[in-house]
Amino acid sequence: MQSDENKTDSLDSERLVQLVQNFYPELGSAERPQAPSLIQGVIFDLDDTLARLMRPIEELMAEGARAADAYMRAAGMDLPENFDANIVEARHFAEEKSAEENEEHLADDALSFLLQFFGYPASRMDPTVLRTAVDLFYAPEMTAWVLAPDALSMLSSLRNAGYRLALLANHNCDRVFQRAIDYLGIRNYFDVCLSSASVEYRKPDSRFLNIVVERWGAMPHEVIVVGDSIAQDVRAGLALGAWTILVSSGVAPQVAHDNLRFAQEFPPDATIDALSEIPGLVQTWST
């Protein structure tokens, strides 16, 4: 016969299950797998990690800049000749400044500053037109992303095993970043999807990653950071105190060059060629 104390414990457990089912149905049944204690979650980068562009980035930017230029002229803005080329240059300049200062320079601000540089006063700028022009500039790029091989099966495997997943990327326009996630159809795999444009800092600043670690209530050593860049992803993960995985296949030439340069200074815990290798590594580090 159970003691009164055991009966109370049993009753409390049953009541807890019932409460979860009544008030938190999205959590599923009590049988839902839980993440092993040694690894709680995985933080992913997006570009050249989970997804890749089908066309060259310079080609996509040129196409988007022409569309943005034509739209602003149609909206009544008096722009100098060949203004579209300056839109591309302004993006390059903003990205370089972001990397140097480790602080994101937003896409809307970059276009606004460019227009002012060419003598178009801020007082005459329509915020809606400016925002739409930025959206048009990024539209070809946003729709050119395709998931890397094994991305969906890998994410499903980790999610089904009970691990938490997050997607954090350096990007200068959060609404474009969020639309790209929806376009790829992967939002439901993640607990958190953040771009650097939505916060004060960007990778390799580990505070960006720590937003997720604190949200999960995890310790840094219970988290794995996955990305294609040693200078940004791996470096941020190491500074945080997390495990790190470098994805070496399909990276941009400049990133591949930088990875060789920083490999000795910021060595990742593992380097992989295919995303399908990740669940095995996570399982190994979990035990």
Image (spheres, rainbow, N blue to C red):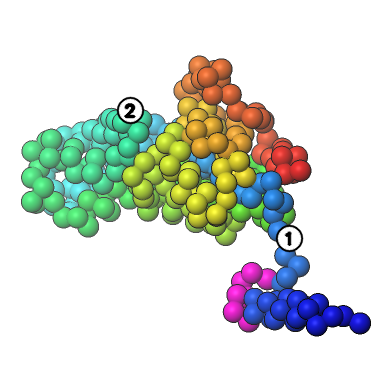
Q: Is residue 263 above or below residue 131?
A: above
Percent across and percent down for residue 48 are 53, 36
**Camera-nearest residue between 167 and 249:** 167
State which quadrant residue 84 falls in.
Answer: top left
Q: Is residue 113 magenta?
A: no
Q: Position of residue 222 (x, y in %)?
A: 62, 45
**Main secondary structure type of the part rendered in magenta:** helix
**Helix, strand or loop status at disc 2:** helix
Q: Which residue type carries mark 2? A: Glu
* Residue ID at (43%, 42%): 207
Give the labeled residue for mark 2.
Answer: 100
Relative horizontal placement of residue 28, taking residue 71 as reference (left or right): right
Quick check: 253 above or below 168? Answer: above
Q: Secondary structure at mark 1?
A: loop
Residue 4 location in percent, x, y? 80, 83
Image quadrant in which the N terminus is located: bottom right
Identified at 44% across, 54% down, the residue is: 179
Q: Nearer the viewer, residue 183 or 7?
A: 7
Residue 130 left/right relative to 266: left
Residue 149 spot, x, y in % from top left: 65, 41
Question: What whole-number distance in Å separates the C-alpha atoms at marks 2 and 1?
Answer: 43 Å
Front-lying residue, 111 or 238:
238
Q: Which residue is disc 1 drawn over?
A: 33
- Residue 214 appears left or right of 248: left
Tag count: 2
- The part of the chain drawn in magenta is 21-28
